[in-house]
Amino acid sequence: MGGSSNLLSSHISREIRHALSGFARRGFGSVRVTVIVQGVAWKTSIFPDSKEGAYILPIKKDVRKQIGVDVGDNAEFRLIIDDIQ
C-alpha cells in the first residue's frame, strides 16, 4: 500500500480486470472485496483510477491503526473479490 492514494500495482490491477471480465460492474466501476492484512480482515470496495490504470484500495484510519500501517507504508495483503463469488 504505497503512496497517499493506496494504488494497487499494475500487475495486481491487470489480474483484477482479467478476473472481472464478463461480470457486471458496480457504480464508478467499484469492486466489492475482502482485504486481509496481518490477520485482520475487512470488507471494502476498490475503485479504478483511469489516470493511473490501476485500482485504488481505500483504507480507513482506524483500520490502518489496527494493522499498524500508515499512509506511504507498504504491506502484504490478500484481496478476495466478493463480486464474483
Image (cartoon, helix red, strand yellow):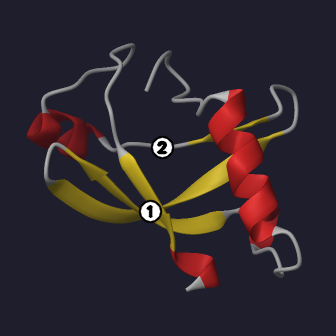
Disc assigned to residue 44 = 1
Of mark 1 and mark 2, the one earlier in the sequence is 1
Q: Is mark 1 on a helix, strand or loop?
A: strand
Instruction: Count neighbours of disc 2 (C-alpha within 10 A) and say few if under 14, some if 14 to 19, many if 20 or more.
Output: some
Question: Do the numbered discs 1 and 2 sit on residues whose CB atoms are within 8 Å?
Answer: yes
Q: What element carries label 2?
A: loop
Residue 83, image x, y percentages: 61, 79
Instruction: Answer above or below: position of 52 versus 27.
Output: above
Between 46 and 60, the one lying in front of the other is: 46
* Residue at left offset 13%, top offset 29%: 68
Q: What residue type is labelled 2?
A: Pro
Direction from residue 44 to residue 19 in the image, left or right: right
Q: Quadrant of the N terminus?
A: top left
Direction from residue 11 to residue 63 in the image, left or right: left
Q: Mark 2 points at which residue?
A: 58
Q: Which amino acid does label 1 sit on?
A: Thr
Residue 36, image x, y percentages: 28, 54
Which quadrant of the structure image shows residue 49? top right
For this orientation, the residue located farthest to the bottom is 85
* Residue at left offset 22%, top offset 25%: 69
* Residue at left offset 75%, top offset 75%: 26
Q: In which quarter of the image is the C terminus?
A: bottom right
Instruction: Answer above or below: position of 9 versus 41.
Output: above
Residue 61, image x, y percentages: 26, 38
Disc assigned to residue 32 = none
Between 9 and 56, the one lying in front of the other is: 9
Q: How far apart are marks 1 and 2 (CA)?
A: 8 Å
